[in-house]
Image (cartoon, rainbow, N blue to C red):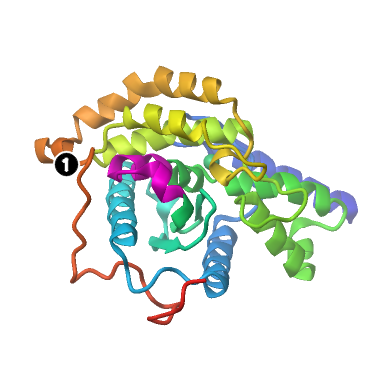
Amino acid sequence: MKYLRILIIFLIGLSVISCSKVPITGRKQLKLIPYSTMMEMGQTNYATFLKENPAINPPTRSSAEVSAVGVRISKAVEKYLRDNKLGNKVEGYKWEFNVVDSPDANAWCMPGGKVVVYTGILPLTKDDAGLAVVMGHEIAHAIAEHGNERMSQQLAVEAAGIGLDIYMQQKPQQTRDIFMSAFGIGSQVGMLGYSRQHELEADKLGLVFMAMAGFNPERAVSFWQDMSKVGGNKPPEILSTHPSDAHRIDKVKEFLPEALKYYSSNAPEQVKNTNQTKAVTPDPKKPVTPADNRKPGVKIK
Ligand SMILES: [Zn+2]
């Protein structure tokens, strides 16, 4: 029985390896957790997180900017994926962009397009293009399904001998902890975070995604230079595995010509002129944050 399970996991792995690639980079990946399960966990854990860490409401100018930049990137990414027959990568996505009041310079995106940006990162992003660097990077982690890869690696160890399905059924709390730590959320010891390879891949995809949305990807260089000056003993997700700053900036510069191709074909003149400094004006008719998990007027901690 045990061997049968191992064989099944192995076969699932093989089938996933043979047909699953990261968009744009084309890297083959091993993912053991069904897409639908990751989506479900994204939905549930996002709701729980926002219950415990209420999003800023009513919207502020900053949170409206986060939402506007997020919507622009998500639309561009979805269009690109659908145009390239990769629509399955965003199947069932219901994008949400929320800002949480916290001194941490952090942001993340769960499967399903569930984004949180912490107010602590806003002084570093400075303008819409800076925000687009961060959000492009986080959205890239989700589209590339890095969380699934991280969870798969961890669960393969934890569930060895029991089987993945049984482990996840019998240990919902542990499964949730692994999920959260795979996304770099929380502070538990032994946090997984993303690997260095994932970080560099998210940087690349992020540049392309921001460029597709009409933000100049060259902005990433000064953003990462600013980030390299941020210290502290609790690195945010975006710096979780410390790709050395110089190495990261070199890689960003190296990939810029490729990303700029997407920018030149996606940047109308007025976008080019506004994305550097000017804030996006919030549209009062548009709900900034879907409010299903929050009450208006919630006090920000
Ligand atoms: Zn990252």
- Which residue is drawn at the image coordinates 44% and 79% (left, top)? 298
| Res 71 quadrant in image | bottom left
Specify whether 60 is left or right of 49: left
Residue bearing mark 1: 274
Q: Position of residue 264 (x, y in %)?
A: 20, 28
User: Of residues 40 and 63, which is closer to you in this image?
Assistant: 63
Q: Does 278 sit above or below residue 119? A: above
Most distant residue in the left direction:
269
Question: Magenta segment range?
Answer: 121-136
Specify whether 237 is left or right of 121: right
Magenta stretch secondary structure, dominant: helix
Q: Is residue 270 visible?
A: yes
Q: Mark 1 packing: few (<14 Cα in 10 Å), some, or many (20+)?
A: some
User: Of residues 134 and 211, which is closer to you in this image?
Assistant: 134
Q: Amino acid at mark 1?
A: Thr
Q: Report the quarter where the N terminus lies.
A: bottom right
Q: Position of residue 89 (x, y in %)?
A: 44, 49
